[in-house]
Amino acid sequence: MKKFSVTIAGGGSTYTPGIVLLMLDNLDKFPVRQIKLYDNDEARQKIVADACEILIKERAPEIEFVATTDPETGFSDIDFVMAHIRVGKYEMRELDEKIPLKYGLVGQETCGPGGIAYGMRSIGGVIEMVDYMEKYSPNAWMLNYSNPAAIVAEATRRLRPNSKILNICDMPIGIEARMAKILGLSSRKEMNIRYYGLNHFGWWTDIRDQEGNDLMPQLIEHVQENGYDVGIHSDGSWQRTFQAAKDTQALDPKTLPNTYLKYYFFPNQEVEHSDPNYTRANMVIDGREKNVFSECNRIVEAGTSEGTTLKAGDHASYIIDLARAIAYNTHERMLLIVENKGAISNFDETAMVEVPCVVGANGPEPLTQGEIPRFQKGLMEQQVAVEKLVVEAWMEQSYQKLWQALTLSRTVPNAEVAKQVLDELIEANKAYWPELH
Ligand code: NAD
Ligand code: G6P
Ligand code: MN
């Protein structure tokens, strides 16, 4: 059986140990001969890499392990790149969230002005990795979940249309896990779903069990009462997000919404619930980053992972599913961000949409979702125009187009405040954005 060589790009990510452990847990399903970590921040990656080296040595010593900041070493002799970079790191995420909030606007990692700012940073970083992969391992596939995935996906469509890159998000997967819990199913894989939208901007229209029974009524009843709250613990801000799905769902009671729609439907509530001095970035720095990094340090000091609190990123198992689908032509049905090309029949052919796809050795085959209603179509046309304008602004270094993008976002009330936020974001992102004219 062929064994695969995998690069995790953004090796210093808080998610890296979870993915390494997940791979180590699944070697029977997805055999691995080599794991490489690649990052452009050597010091940050070293913390994670030294701990991963111990995890691998203890559990699967036959696997070769490399941690590098050198692109040639990082991208040579590989079959898959699992990419989760954060250009500008948490320091810039904090500004993406705090600058809009100063103007009373949603301050969020992937939605509204913050997402646009992050997109302008990510495009260059992701394109650079695609180029390294194609130069050093031309047959490899990139499984990308670097955010903001919608903008990154549009950028790769425009700039590298023939590249083997698949863009995927874990939010629908996390929500489906909650749906399975509501239904008393042991796995989300027992459901067959229909879904359409953009990344962080979509709706389930149909959910059935293996026998074809309609599960929507039971799910809708639960969501109308509790949102996606299923009584399992998640931290405070996520808890609120899962509950907020109740209000979002009311806009179209026959479907089930992605949690991220709340930022577009109820931006004022989001702003009211935000602390402009302590945003989600601060919570992640004081929570996930602190926990993962201190545990990595502890493992390295002890020289053993015995008793570790690091866990296989269970909800990240979709990444192995995706790699397996390509490697073994499994034809698993998965939600991916792909060029529309008629999957949504009354929507822009060139939009990057999120729809179920059958995934095999040649990549994804999108499943037709048919016509969508006027409400969703209107919202999605507006949002997809924002995403396309951001990519064009990056390509043409156009101030004008970026101002238009901000003005068009549902989270921004007028062109005047759009310009004020834009000017402040330009200052803050000088080291990362192309210069705009
Ligand atoms: P993190 O900051 O902990 O890790 C990101 C790493 O990327 C850092 O070590 C950083 O040095 C590195 N990096 C930045 N720019 C780089 C470049 N140009 N080349 C190589 N490495 C670079 O971030 P995190 O919280 O662990 O999240 C990682 C990414 O995964 C983010 O983009 C996040 O939004 C994304 N994410 C996406 C989904 C999804 O649904 N698609 C889910 C979870 C996380
Ligand atoms: C979900 C989304 C990701 C996003 C993450 C943020 O998983 O699908 O796209 O990056 O949430 O989580 P955080 O804990 O970093 O705020
Ligand atoms: Mn996502």
Image (tube, rainbow, N blue to C red):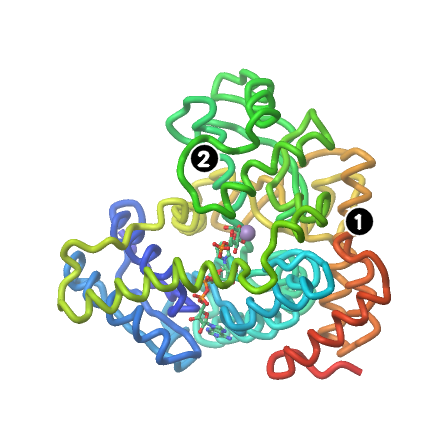
Amino acid at pointer 2 = Ala
Residue name at image x 35 percent, y 73 percent: 45
Circles 2, 1 touching at the beta carbon (< 8 Å)? no
Of 312 and 318, nearer the camera is 312
Quadrant (top left/top right/bottom left/bottom right) for the C terminus: bottom right
Q: Earlier in the sequence, mark 2 or mark 1?
A: 2
Of 140 and 82, nearer the camera is 82
Task: Indicate the position of residue 374 as horizontal and vertical percent values.
Answer: 83, 36
**Element class at badge 1:** helix
Mark 2 to mark 1 CA distance (whole Å): 29 Å
Amino acid at pointer 1 = Glu
Task: Indicate the position of residue 312 as horizontal and vertical percent values.
Answer: 30, 50
> Viewer-nearest of labels 2 and 1?
2
**Element class at badge 2:** helix
Task: Indicate the position of residue 126 as horizontal and vertical percent values.
Answer: 55, 69
| Left or right placement of residue 401 versus residue 244 in this view | right
| Total tally of numbered discs in the picture | 2
| Left or right placement of residue 4 versus residue 173 in this view | left
Is there any visible trace of residue 300 in the rendered image? yes
- Ligand 2 lies under 8 Å from the Cβ of mark 2: no
Q: Which residue is label 2 attached to?
A: 177
Is there any visible trace of residue 328 in the rendered image? no
Residue name at image x 73 percent, y 40 percent: 344
Which residue lies most toward the right here? 415
Q: Which residue is label 1 attached to?
A: 381
- Ligand 3 lies under 8 Å from the Cβ of mark 1: no
Of 218 and 210, nearer the camera is 218
Q: Residues within 10 Å of mark 1 (few under 14, many from 20)?
A: some
Quarter residue 59 falls in: bottom left
Residue name at image x 41 percent, y 74 percent: 39
